Image (cartoon, grey):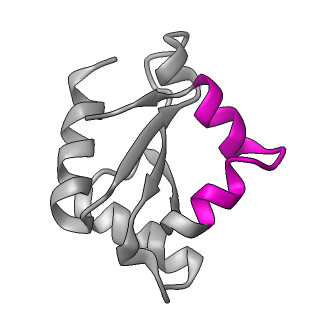
Amino acid sequence: MDDKARKIARKLRKHLNAEKILLFGSRARGDYLKHSDYDFIIVSKAFEGVKFPDRQLQATNATGFYSADYLCYTPTEFNKKKTEIGIVRQAVEEGVSLP
């Protein structure tokens, strides 16, 4: 995993008080190309009561990094989604938890 992902994670923790950050997709697997984007799941209580598109905007503003997809969940939403078939469960199984 590269330094850019770690820097983004630090900013997300600082500005959104993120409890959990997962890097998934090609950057986590290591099979990315030069211009591949970053895929993150961010879990934070700060997203409670915030519409889903606005959460992504919050994450982008917190990091200043636009070449990323941010999937933003509250802890309750994340705990439900990680048990369902879909991208969140796959990211939990295959992704990398960032400090």
| Residue at the spot 38% in from the left edge and 52% down from the top edge | 66
| Residue at the spot 69% in from the left edge and 60% down from the top edge | 80
Q: Residue furthest bottom?
A: 49
Image spot of residue 83 (x, y percent): 74, 47
In terms of depth relative to the viewer, which is nearer, 3 or 10? 10
Image spot of residue 32 (x, y percent): 52, 16
| Residue at the spot 49% in from the left edge and 89% down from the top edge | 49
Q: Quadrant of the C terminus?
A: top left
| Residue 5 placement, left or right of 31 | left
Q: Is residue 32 magenta?
A: no
So how many labels did they put on this image?
0
Image spot of residue 63 (x, y percent): 25, 55
Q: Quadrant of residue 79?
A: bottom right
| Residue 80 placement, left or right of 47 | right
Q: Main secondary structure of the magenta part?
A: helix
Q: Residue furthest right?
A: 85
Image spot of residue 95 (x, y percent): 54, 28
Q: Quadrant of the N terminus?
A: top left
In terms of depth relative to the viewer, which is nearer, 38 or 90? 90
Q: Is residue 83 magenta?
A: yes
Is 25 located above or below residue 32 in the figure? below
| Residue 43 placement, left or right of 90 | left
In terms of depth relative to the viewer, which is nearer, 17 or 12? 17
| Residue at the spot 35% in from the left edge and 72% down from the top edge | 58
Q: Quadrant of residue 23?
A: top left
Is 92 located above or below residue 29 in the figure? below
Q: Which residues are magenta?
A: 77-94
